């Protein structure tokens, strides 16, 4: 398994070509309001919209399932936590496991949470599957006026991500070669993990030091205002994407409120 | 020379800390197999993972020692986590920002002059508060207040203080003798070679 | 063209007692091509870093003066280009064209001028791919070529090259030398530090560790006068022969046998055997899977097909517990720092025996002595120089007395003295009945030491390698 960063979606799809900051902003604008409620209806509407819109971003459903497996785990965890700790146990009793009463209220609450997790995570997955990190950095600098040195510095470091992943694997093998392995004992496994993580941090910091020198050698800290080799334009279509996301999210919430199912997180 | 201006090495090292922790997290997910991952919701495992997740904010502050280090590194770490595909999507980004702000406030309260163990613990605690607040309101509202939400929040703050706070301080002390921190004040404390 | 003047220049890094370089007086004129030589520790890289204006003011102490065309190097940085030895940490962007454009962006070159300049310099260095080529998909040699383009795009008048081929295999090194030759600008002054395969230059300057310039003049004269002493100190002086160390007796029993062992996508099926009392060299171009084979033989990686039999054990090596593995097969990695686990050299050596429940002290003392690491017993392994780190990683593999030693590129980046020491050490192990497998692209190493060679083919499809006896 390796760390891969390139976009895996079809870059020619209409929405995939939108400005990266617009895409990220749309994802945030759409998902943050969805967090405001705990009922199952809002995330269902949200998910429906997201799945419908996905082909416009050029993301195939198969790619999505490949990247969405952590969500399934989260879902399982939520179900368990809800059975044990749910605050609201209204509704018909379905099953009693000792002191833990599983009622329809608990299940609908769990369903709401699980759907919420999926609805919130999906736009992020879509954005990062269709966005190249360099383009995102360029857009942040040119369209949002983020400080260029930080954006480029971050980009240079992120380029090393797959290399450091490979370095981790080499470090793990090297530890076995030194006679250090951990078997099933969790404490031993933790110590081994910690030792490998430390070595990785040293290797990463060393590379970082050399990278910084090389960047300075090419004039990174010269103080001269930087120019842009690649243009990132923020057009009306991008602004429209942002507005439409906000509107769709508001529509989902309004529907829930009108259906009387709105359950705010505060209050 | 303006000591608050970020040198290239400051920017790159802060970024590399975020990237390295991204790798460490990716490796963690592989080492602790899928079934154990789902039980990350249970207190002891959750607390441990969370503590490590909050380390970039404090570690960066202790090494770089300039305003903005904690916020920048923790937010970038969150961005990388979203990039690599985590279960919370892009919402980790505002959460990371809040966490980084916690540590930043702690170092700022000390006027960016104190970086020893008490400062690290303080920064760790406030980072934990940031994380706990986000979770309390966004992810945990459906659970029982006193048997889950409050203990969860307290555990987050405690583990953050210990792991992200004391842990980061110990990590800086372990890194200094290797020579990788030579361009930073933290690295100059080691003996002449 | 740049004129470079150093007057009594010295530099000490923060946290060090000794000066990295001291008392250097040097004058280099327009358009000269100069090779900077000296034993390790003479401060060659420090001088280049100083000329590039890269020495940090906040962590070190300077002495004397440097002028480039009469300017302080920090002000003259626009006209200086430098190439370092590790390609991976010089490339900044994910796409090749973007990386070259990085230098232009930093200097505020107007956008309309950037891409034509990029295209021109890529052509000048002979870069074969398009602007979109991902930098991670390039070979080491191509990455260095790209890095050279990045340094040249702003048309510097002084070009500094700090061991540009040191991290590359021979093919990559040839690519880079070719690129440097192609890009050669009669107008630019060039100062070069190189390690092995010294290029032809007009002038050689030899630095003395701890102070000053030992020699300065045309290569033939300098090597004639100082060649012996330099070779003894570890400089790869051209034309000096290397010792031959062949096996005295026949090979002993079979230690490890690989039968049609393959790793999907990384190594084509190969069969070979490693025996006690012989040195087997594994050669082949980049991408043939040499390192993968080393990992498989070392019991660190499970083959996806084929069988591994070792030491009469039914189970293949990758199924052994790590402690058991270290008693039979020791692995030495290409990057010594990968194998460091503790924070003191002595603890590193003690780790192996301790894991096996043995008393570490005699083993540690013996190895410190044998590998000349005694003075470093309390040092942090990460602060060791390249040669010292290499010796330490070999020592840690030997601490558990394995019968077979598998080494991945053991002579990589070594100076002549450490190279000879290593070859002698391995020859001694062979004579004592150990088996040695060395994955290497160093032809001199193969000629000096190897009893058998397994050559891995370039393509990963179906051809299996054959083991040939080395003539002589």
Image (spheres, coloured by chain):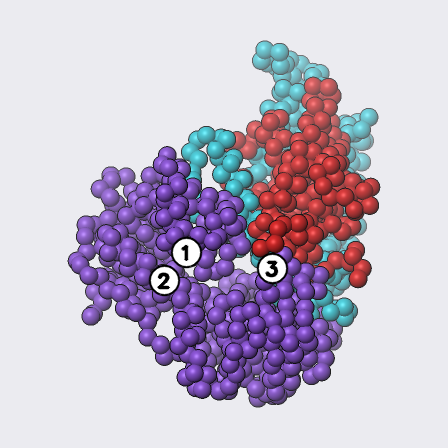
Chain colours: A cyan, B red, C purple
Q: Write down the quadrant of residue A16 in the picture.
A: bottom right
The residue under label 3 is C17
Compare residues C392 and A101 and report the one nearer the observer.
C392
Q: In the structure shown, which secondary structural element does the residue marked by tag 1 occupy?
A: loop
- Residue B123 in sight here: no
| Chain ID, mark 3 | C
Compare residues A108 and C384 and report the one nearer the observer.
C384
Say if B174 sits above or below C7 in the image.
above
Q: Are marks 2 and 1 on the same chain?
A: yes
Q: In the structure shown, which secondary structural element does the residue marked by tag 3 occupy?
A: loop
Q: Are marks 3 and 1 on the same chain?
A: yes
The residue under label 1 is C372
**How many residues crowd around disc 1 within 10 Å: few (fewer than 14), some, or many (20 or more)?**
few
**How many residues crowd around disc 3 within 10 Å: few (fewer than 14), some, or many (20 or more)?**
few
Going by the image, does C13 lie left or right of A196? right
Q: Which of the marked residues, 3 or 2, is nearer the chain's N terminus?
A: 3
Alpha carbon separation for disc pair 3 and 1: 21 Å
For image coordinates 68% across by 80% down, the residue present is C68
């Amino acid at each position: 398994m390796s760390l891969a960063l390139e976009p895996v979606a079809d870059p020619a799809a209409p929405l995939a070509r939108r400005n990266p900051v617009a895409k990220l902003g749309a994802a945030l604008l759409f998902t943050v309001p969805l967090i405001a409620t705990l009922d199952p209806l809002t995330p269902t509407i949200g998910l429906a919209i997201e799945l419908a819109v996905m082909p416009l971003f050029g993301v195939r459903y198969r790619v999505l399932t490949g990247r969405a497996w952590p969500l399934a785990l989260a879902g399982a965890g939520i179900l368990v936590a809800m059975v044990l700790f749910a605050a609201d146990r209204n509704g018909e009793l379905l099953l009693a496991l000792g002191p833990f009463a599983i009622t329809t209220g608990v299940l609908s609450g769990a369903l709401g949470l699980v759907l919420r997790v999926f609805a919130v995570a999906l736009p992020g997955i879509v954005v990062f599957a269709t966005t190249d990190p360099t383009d995102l950095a360029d857009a942040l600098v040119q369209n949002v006026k983020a400080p260029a040195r930080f954006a480029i510095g971050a980009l240079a470091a992120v380029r090393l991500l797959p290399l450091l992943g490979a370095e981790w694997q080499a470090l793990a093998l090297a530890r076995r070669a030194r006679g250090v392995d951990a078997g099933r004992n969790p404490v031993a496994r933790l110590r081994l993990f910690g030792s490998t993580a430390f070595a990785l941090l040293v290797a990463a910091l060393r590379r970082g030091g050399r990278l910084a020198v090389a960047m300075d050698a090419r004039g990174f800290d010269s103080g001269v205002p930087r120019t842009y080799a690649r243009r990132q334009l923020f057009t009306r279509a991008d602004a429209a994407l942002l507005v439409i996301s906000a509107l769709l999210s508001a529509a989902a919430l309004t529907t829930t409120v009108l259906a009387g199912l709105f359950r705010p997180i505060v209050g | 020379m303006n000591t608050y201006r970020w040198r290239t090495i400051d920017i790159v090292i802060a970024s590399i800390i975020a990237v390295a922790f991204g790798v460490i997290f990716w490796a963690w997910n592989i080492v602790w197999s899928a079934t154990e991952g789902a039980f990350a919701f249970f207190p002891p495992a959750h607390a441990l993972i969370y503590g490590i997740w909050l380390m970039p904010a404090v570690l960066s502050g202790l090494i770089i020692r300039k305003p903005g280090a904690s916020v920048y590194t923790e937010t970038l770490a969150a961005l990388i986590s979203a990039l690599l595909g985590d279960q919370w999507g892009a919402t980790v980004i505002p959460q990371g920002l809040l966490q980084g702000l916690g540590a930043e406030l702690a170092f700022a309260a000390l006027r960016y002059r104190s970086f020893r163990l008490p400062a690290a613990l303080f920064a760790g605690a406030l980072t934990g508060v940031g994380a706990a607040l986000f979770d309390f309101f966004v992810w945990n509202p459906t659970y029982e207040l006193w048997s889950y939400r409050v203990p969860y929040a307290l555990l987050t703050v405690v583990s953050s203080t210990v792991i992200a706070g004391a842990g980061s301080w110990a990590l800086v002390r372990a890194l200094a003798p290797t020579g990788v921190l030579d361009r930073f004040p933290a690295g100059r404390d080691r003996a002449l070679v | 063209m740049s004129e470079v003047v150093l007057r009594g220049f010295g530099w000490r890094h923060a946290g060090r007692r000794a000066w990295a370089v001291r008392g250097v007086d040097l004058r280099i004129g327009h358009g000269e091509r100069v090779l900077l030589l000296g034993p390790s520790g003479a401060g060659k890289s420090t001088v280049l870093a100083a000329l590039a204006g890269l020495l940090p003011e906040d962590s070190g102490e300077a002495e004397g003066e440097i002028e480039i065309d009469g300017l302080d190097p920090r002000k003259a940085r626009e006209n200086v280009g430098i190439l370092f030895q590790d390609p991976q940490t010089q490339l900044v962007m994910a796409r090749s064209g973007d990386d070259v454009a990085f230098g232009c962006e930093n200097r505020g070159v107007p956008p309309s001028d950037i891409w034509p300049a990029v295209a021109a310099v890529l052509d000048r260095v002979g870069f074969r791919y398009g602007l979109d080529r991902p930098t991670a998909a390039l070979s080491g040699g191509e990455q260095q070529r790209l890095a050279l383009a990045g340094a040249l795009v702003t048309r510097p008048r002084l070009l500094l090259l700090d061991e540009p081929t040191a991290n590359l295999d021979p093919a990559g090194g040839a690519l880079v030398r070719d690129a440097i030759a192609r890009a050669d600008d009669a107008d630019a002054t060039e100062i070069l530090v190189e390690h092995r395969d010294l290029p032809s230059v007009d002038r050689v300057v030899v630095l003395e560790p701890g102070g000053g310039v030992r020699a300065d003049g045309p290569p033939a004269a300098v090597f004639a006068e100082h060649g012996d002493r330099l070779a003894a100190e570890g400089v790869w002086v051209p034309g000096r022969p290397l010792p031959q160390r062949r096996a005295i007796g026949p090979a002993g029993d079979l230690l490890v046998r690989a039968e049609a062992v393959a790793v999907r996508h990384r190594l084509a099926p190969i069969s070979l055997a490693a025996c006690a009392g012989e040195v087997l060299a594994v050669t082949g171009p980049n991408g043939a899977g040499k390192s993968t084979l080393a990992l498989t033989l070392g019991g660190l990686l499970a083959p996806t097909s084929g069988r591994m039999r070792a030491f009469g054990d039914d189970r293949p090596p990758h199924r052994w517990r790590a402690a058991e593995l270290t008693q039979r097969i020791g692995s030495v990695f290409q990057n010594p720092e990968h194998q460091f686990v503790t924070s003191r050299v002595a603890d590193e050596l003690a780790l192996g025996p301790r894991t096996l429940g043995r008393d570490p002290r005699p083993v540690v003392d013996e190895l410190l002595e044998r590998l000349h690491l005694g003075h470093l017993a309390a040092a942090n392994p990460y602060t060791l120089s390249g040669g010292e780190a290499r010796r330490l990683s070999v020592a840690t593999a030997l601490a558990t007395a394995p019968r077979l030693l598998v080494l991945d590129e053991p002579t990589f980046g070594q100076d002549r003295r450490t190279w000879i020491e290593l070859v002698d050490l391995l020859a001694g192990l062979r004579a004592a009945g150990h088996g040695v497998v060395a994955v290497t692209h160093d032809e001199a190493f193969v000629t000096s030491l190897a009893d058998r060679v397994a050559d891995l083919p370039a393509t990963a499809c179906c051809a299996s390698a054959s083991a040939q006896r080395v003539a002589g």
